Amino acid sequence: MKKRQGFRFGLFLVTIGIVYGDIGTSPMYVMKSILEGNGGIAQVNEDFIIGSLSLVFWTITLLTTIKYVLIAMKADNHGEGGIFSLYSLVKGYGKWLILPAMLGGAALLADGVLTPAVTVTTAVEGLRSIPSMDRFLGAGQWKVVIITLAIITLLFSVQHEGTSRIGKAFGPVMLVWFSFLGVTGALHIAALPVVLKAFNPLYAVRVLLSPFNKLGFMILGSVFLATTGAEALYSDMGHVGKENIYYSWPFVKLCLLLNYMGQGAWILQSRGNAALYAVEDLNPFFLMLPEVLRPFAVVLGAAAAIIASQALITGSYTLVSEAILLDLLPHLEIRYPSDTKGQLYIGTVNTVLWIGCSLVVLYFRSGARMESAYGLAITITMLMTTLLISVYLRRVRKKAALSMLVLVAFGLLEGVFFISSLGKFVHGGYVTVFLTLILLLLMIIWYRGTQLERRFSTRLRVREHVDSLVALHNDEQIPLLAHNLVYLDNETDPELMDRDILYSILDKDAKRAQAYFFVSVHVLNEPNTMNYELETYGTDCIFRIRLNLGFKCSQRINVYLRQIVQDLQERGELPVQDKRYSIYGKSTVGTFKFCIIHKSVTTKTELSELDELLLNMKYSIRHMAGSKEKWYGLDTSSLILENVPLITGGPGPSQRIQRKETDA
């Protein structure tokens, strides 16, 4: 049994620096959005404010604390969280479960594009609460947009340093941020403790039915913003470990609630201030502070907004890496900046997110417009996560009653939030919905294409063809193509091999070599382990190599193979190779040629038109995403590229063609 790790302040700092940025910046816009939706500060009364605060409190408690921290985080896949990790635990209990996994993952990735844009823009707009900075920014938004784009660009440019280093840098900032939220909120609560009535859920129910609530149930669209970081919290679990989240969440939640209650107290105290009625985009978070503290709050808020973006960025890396393992997205180069496998960096994802966030800022230009679009997609992710958790509890944990309770309680609650958020669609929510559909289509194409590849691929038993390979190796009438001919194969069973590989060697211009290598690469959970496993089929010219590489190890296959050839020669398992001509002098390690086989659909087949289209689209996406030559460091090696049809054609004609005889 694994020993439970005790509290460590350093890990506590890293955790609040990585995980809580998104949910931690919600106080900057939740109460602002609630006020705007109800007509401004002049249109609210005590029951409305206390009821709204009660909705915020119980939303955070039910969705974040109970659903994610206490329930979802128990469903980890070797320490990793997120909707794809959850799916991997239940995928054996129904093929249909791939659909909620893909939809939820696509929605979360789409929301990850909007989150950095809305949080950073809102923080920069906080400068307007300072008169001198308001004059500097002027009436337009172009200066706000430029500052926001500069901050976002800087954020994405440092991602390659890794979340551990970033977390250590961001941790102290977030500690100050949450402490600031708690202290400033507590001071206002002390002046008007009546807001503590919000802990009573009856006020939450009353406000939904109150005539003073002009939006009715649609107010939940604004309230939901208080918990939008909950799904990212689950996704980032692999970066910091669940125990560190258990230790840090109570502190974070306390500070958040104190600030929300403090804003509510300030609003109630300020209702009679006519000067506030004319303030455009009134933000209680900044205005409740003494004017001397606002510059500090703006700078600190901007830093927290950057960190909020960090939570979604790191969560996106994890989601994409898991989607790749599930064959939902194309293979992308993944780097591991630290010795923890959960902390990773994907350059392609980083670039796409940066471009997407920048375009969102340029399109919406203001925080208020972005807030109108924010949160719709994440309600879809939460609903899909609830569905998968219920399956996990029922089928894996064998807790049928708890499974039904989770499905009904959270399904209804999140369903209400989803319906209330639908009003955001026409105000900008269509952007995240569009992104979700694009990502979902990409996953469907890749998943269906992989299914078709597996359906039509043929595996042959290697030992049945060993004699032919040995005979070709010994046939000196055929010119030697290379001393070492290398093929890459993902087959895990050493007794089986892709038919196209054997066809390439024996049938497609017979390729004679002194040694045939069939290589597969397997990534280990340890960071720096390097070893290989070998199967020779009783020969000295056919070698099945399984490369076991730690997740931090380079995957430059050409380098490892030279070392393996030398090792085999020293052990007497491979004859010495005579490489006479080289600028480095004579060598016992001969030449290498790497044969890369690309599948394609080039002829009319038994596939339906839709499947043929999807498969061709998958191959186009694979081409754009990169190639094996680049992934494995073979782009500078001697390569043979072959295109082979996945399906050689449909059924042939039932009759044999006849020769027509002609008169002499």
Image (tube, rainbow, N blue to C red):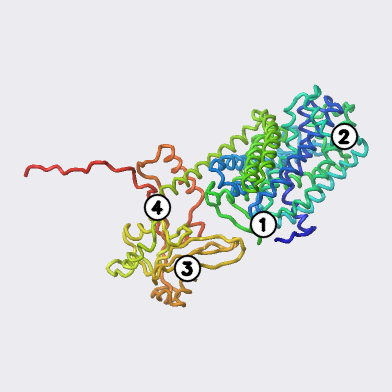
> How far apart, in angstroms, are the residues tagged by discs 1 and 3?
36 Å
Residue contact between numbered discs 2 and 3, judged by CB atoms under 8 Å? no
Q: Secondary structure at mark 4?
A: loop
Residue under label 1:
161
Residue 203 horizontal/vertical position (percent): 83, 30
Between 558 and 106, the one nearer to me in the picture? 106
Viewport quadrant of the C terminus:
top left
Question: Where does residue 73 sit, x and y in percent of width and height?
Answer: 70, 49
Please give the residue where the numbered disc 2 appears in the rendered image. Answer: 197
Q: Nearer the viewer, mark 2 or mark 1?
A: 2
x, y (%) of residue 75? 66, 49
Q: CA distance from mark 2 to mark 1?
A: 46 Å
- Image-based side of 66 in relation to 100, left or right: right
Disc 1 residue crowd, few under 14, some 14–19, many 20+, Cα 10 Å: some
Q: Quadrant of residue 212?
A: top right
What's the amino acid at mark 3? Leu
Q: Label 2 amino acid?
A: Lys
SS category of the residue bearing label 1? helix
Q: Nearer the viewer, mark 1 or mark 3?
A: 3
Q: Mark on residue 534?
A: 3
Q: Is residue 556 above or below residue 392?
A: below
Q: Earlier in the sequence, mark 2 or mark 1?
A: 1
Which residue is pictured at 44% across the width and 43% down the height?
A: 615
Asked if the residue under mark 4 is in contact with the one under mark 1, i.e. CB atoms within 8 Å, the reply is no
Q: Earlier in the sequence, mark 1 or mark 3?
A: 1
Residue on which the image places disc 4: 458
Tell me the quadrant of the picture where the N terminus can be found.
bottom right
